[in-house]
Image (tube, rainbow, N blue to C red):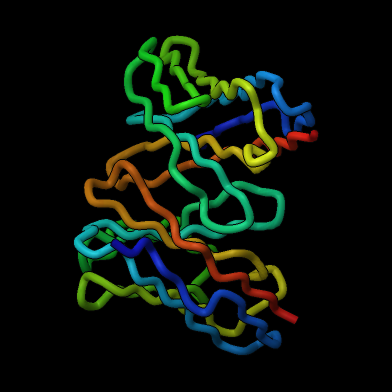
Amino acid sequence: EDKVVQSPLSLVVHEGDTVTLNCSYEVTNFRSLLWYKQEKKAPTFLFMLTSSGIEKKSGRLSSILDKKELFSILNITATQTGDSAVYLCAVHTGTASKLTFGTGTRLQVTL
Amino acid sequence: GAGVSQSPRYKVAKRGQDVALRCDPISGHVSLFWYQQALGQGPEFLTYFQNEAQLDKSGLPSDRFFAERPEGSVSTLKIQRTQQEDSAVYLCASSLDGREQYFGPGTRLTVT
C-alpha cells in the first residue's frame, strides 16, 4: 500500500522564523511529488518535484526532493502570519494519475 | 480564467438520503479527480476521469458511491443512502496533463 508520512504533525513558530516541513514516502511507480497549501478552502498548488536535488523556489518558499532516500522538504523563510495553514504533501503514482496524500503539517505563525 | 468550482459548498443530509455533488473543472482540463477529506486528514482518492471515461474508481468506498462525467466536462458524485461515516469534505480537482492538479473549494457534507 502506498504511504506518505509528514512531520511534524503541527508546528507553532514566531513570525520571522524559518521552518522546515518533512515528507517521506513509500510508493510503487513514483512519478512526482507535490506540495499544497490548504487554508480553509481548496488546497492550492505550490510545487511539483520530479528530479532529485533540484530546488524549486517561489519567494520565501523552496522545496527539494531526494529520490534515493524517498523524502522531500519544504522550507519557509521569514515566516508571516499569512503562512499559517496546513501544508499537504502528495505523491503522484501509477498510470491513473491519482495523488496519495500525507496527513499534513499544521503550521501556525504567531506575532 | 475561473478555477474549479463545486456546488453546493455545504450540504446537510439526513441518514438514508441521497445526495449529488457537482464539480465544474477548469475549461479544457481533460482529467478530473474526486477526493474525500475527513477532518484532520489528507484527501483520499475516490475516482478519476479522463474526458468522459472513468479510468479508475478504486477509491470509491462502497457501491453507494457513483460518479459520472457524461460529456467530459461537469462531473457529479452521487452518494446513495448516506451514512454518518460519509460526513467529510469532498474535493474535486482537474488537470490538463494529469500531473498538476488544481482543486476546487470542496463540498462539506454532514450526515445527521
Locate residue B60 relative to residue B97 in the image: left or right: right
Quarter of the picture holding the C terminus of chain B = bottom right
Q: Nearer the viewer, residue A40 or A7?
A: A40
* Residue A29 seen from this side: no
- Which residue appears at 49% of the width and 11% of the height? A69
Q: Nearer the viewer, residue B9 or A68?
A: B9
Q: Looking at the picture, how far across and down is residue B103, in whole percent?
A: 43, 55
- In the image, is residue B6 above or below residue A111? below
The quadrant holding residue A12 is top right
Locate residue B98 relative to residue A100 in the image: left or right: left
Q: Looking at the picture, how far across and down is residue A30, in whole percent?
A: 37, 28
The quadrant holding residue B32 is bottom left
- Which residue appears at 55% of the width and 33% of the height? A3
Q: Nearer the viewer, residue B26 or A2?
A: B26
- Which residue appears at 56% of the width and 74% of the height? B9
Q: Looking at the picture, how far across and down is residue A10, in whole percent?
A: 75, 34
Q: Nearer the viewer, residue A19 or A29?
A: A19
Q: Looking at the picture, how far across and down is residue B6, in whole percent?
A: 45, 71
* Residue B52 seen from this side: yes
- In the image, is residue B54 above or below residue A25? below
- In the image, is residue A50 above or below residue B57? above
- Which residue appears at 36% of the width and 48% of the height? B101
Locate residue A77 relative to residue B14 in the image: left or right: left
- In this rendering, the count of numbered labels is 0
Quarter of the picture holding the N terminus of chain B = bottom left
